[in-house]
Image (cartoon, rainbow, N blue to C red):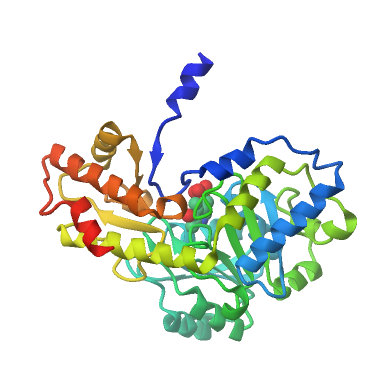
Amino acid sequence: MHAKTISQIQGHWLMTPGPTEVSADVRFAMSQSYTNPDLDPAFLSFYIETAQHFNDFVGNADGETFLLAGEGILGLEAACASMIEPKDRVLIIENGIFGEGFKDFAQMYGADTCVFSGDRRNALDPEAIEAFISKNGPFKYATLVHCETPSGITNPVDAIGKILRRHNIVSIVDSVSAIGGEAMDMTAYGLDVVLCASQKAFSAPVGITTVSLSKIALERLRQRETAIPSFYANLKLWLNYKEEKWFPYTQPIHLLAAFRIAIDQLEKEAFISKHEKVAEAVRQTLVSTGLNLFAQSGHANTVTTVLLPQGIDFEDLQQELSQTSGVLVGGGFGFLSNQIFRIGHMGEGADELKIKRLLSALDQSFMHLGYPLEKSLAKEFVKFL
Ligand SMILES: *Cc1c(COP(=O)(O)O)cnc(C)c1O
């Protein structure tokens, strides 16, 4: 029985916008035997060094990164739980599902929220945000999403970060599906709390969330007046872990080792330009064969959202794809339910050969579904590389 149920979840090939395929090196790191993280001082050094590597990766020059045991959502909740105090005015900047979702977390921890809504098919407009702040401010915090994974839109967090800094607003940024595939330089952009996770562009197993805090955010956290109504999402417990040589709970050493290998393997600039290149080629390919993109601007380097042709159901497409080649792509949810399909080209998926194989499978699937494309996706793709 056990063998059967496990085999059912094996053997898929992922071109989804997260979780992404885990590379062989990272899986190997995961399979080693490790020390007891509670007892062995070598673990503390390993943890500090790993957190520092990530902190350098996101350009958080004068701040610090914590690596928490949990999926990306833990980072979003921990940031809201730990930074926001009851009645704080929080600006929710949104142009999609994750952006909107921040409001629930902020309100759960007592925020007085005010929402700026951008157009859902376009990147956020920094000038419109600045005008909104001048009219509706002041705000203590603002939440925003770097890459709106469900709609495939990357927002200009560099320009928005500078505006928020100028207005003395501490920013909380979900960059879960962006970092690694999009540029991130916290200090240069003026960002304060930046969240990421292991299972998107880093292609490590699900289970680590990263919370990077600027100097300003660290200071805010130290000086907060009310108690944080959480233990697992309480970032204050992490402030002095190095000096105290203490973690709030036993650390997932296998996951951390895997994540460490994944970070070390990346050469930041080259990795981002690889994402840029394949994303551009994927978009040109889709458009040249008569398909339409959902996003009209701010096209993400990590994921592309494609409108489903009239009469094609996402479930049928997914079934065809998995029967022809065992590949999984993403679908739409919320307001995009059964409107789009999503190609994840991040991390291990940002690979020309894998994308070409996926496009061949799409060629076949569209034909089987009675919607032959004007040209072959796989053949077009090669031209645009
Ligand atoms: C993947 C992702 C998360 C983590 O959320 P899950 O839905 O649990 O995977 C958070 N924010 C963004 C933008 C993401 O893409």
Q: Residue at x 80, y 61 (%)?
A: 239
Q: Is residue 91 left or right of residue 53?
A: left
Q: Position of residue 135 (x, y in %)?
A: 50, 84
Residue at the farthest top position: 1
Left or right, residue 32 beside residue 174: right
Q: Position of residue 295 (x, y in %)?
A: 31, 64
Q: Residue at x 80, y 54 (%)?
A: 45
Residue 227 makes an appearance in the image: no
Residue 209 sits above or below residue 21 on the image: below
Q: Quadrant of the C terminus?
A: bottom left
The residue under the point 17% across, 62% down is: 288
Q: Nearer the viewer, residue 62 or 80?
A: 62
What is the x, y in percent for residue 276?
A: 39, 66
For this view, does 26 lie left or right of residue 116? right
When asked about the image quadrant of residue 118, the answer is bottom left
Image label count: 0
The image quarter containing residue 119 is: bottom left
Task: Between residue 188 and residue 248, name the one nearer to us.
Answer: 188
Examine the rendering and report whether any part of residue 111 can be seen. Answer: yes
74 and 372: which is toward the camera = 372
* Residue 4 horizontal/vertical position (percent): 46, 17
- Above or below residue 283? Residue 322 is above
Q: Which image quadrant is residue 85 in?
A: bottom right
| Image side of residue 172 versus residue 68, left or right | left
